[in-house]
Image: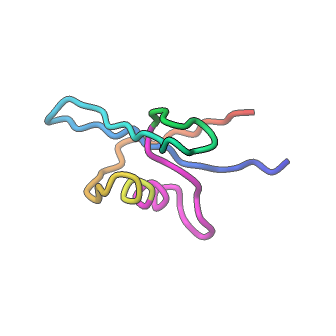
Amino acid sequence: MTAKIIVKCIIYNRALNRFLLVQRCENDHTGANTWENAGGNIEDGETPEDAVFREVKEETGITDIEIKKRSLMSAF
């Protein structure tokens, strides 16, 4: 089986001392209406950082983010 590589982003607003989560739509076949971090698939030729910027913009409309820390996680 080929591993699926995705990105997830913890969005924190220091000025407001708040985290931002996104809610899946009600007709999503996996996890309908659940809350999660912004993120998704890495597209061909895209770096993980580029994928984070794209996914955050697509899911929240936020374009002014700064990546502070990167971590690698795996699931089986």
Give coordinates of residue 23: x percent, y percent.
42, 39
| Model colouring | rainbow
18 or 74: nearer the viewer: 18
Could you tell me which residue is drawn at 58 percent across and 40 percent down? Answer: 72
- Above or below — where is 44 with respect to 21? below
Could you tell me which residue is drawn at 55 percent across and 66 percent down? Answer: 46
72 or 57: nearer the viewer: 57
Residue with the most extreme top position: 17
Give coordinates of residue 43: x percent, y percent.
59, 64
18 or 46: nearer the viewer: 18
Could you tell me which residue is drawn at 53 percent across and 48 percent down? Answer: 7
**In the image, is 26 to the left or to the right of 5?**
left
Q: Which residues are magenta?
A: 37-54
- Above or below — where is 51 with respect to 68? below
48 or 31: nearer the viewer: 31
Reply yes or no: does residue 46 show up in magenta: yes
**Residue 15: quadrant of the picture:** top left
Could you tell me which residue is drawn at 24 percent across and 31 percent down? Answer: 18
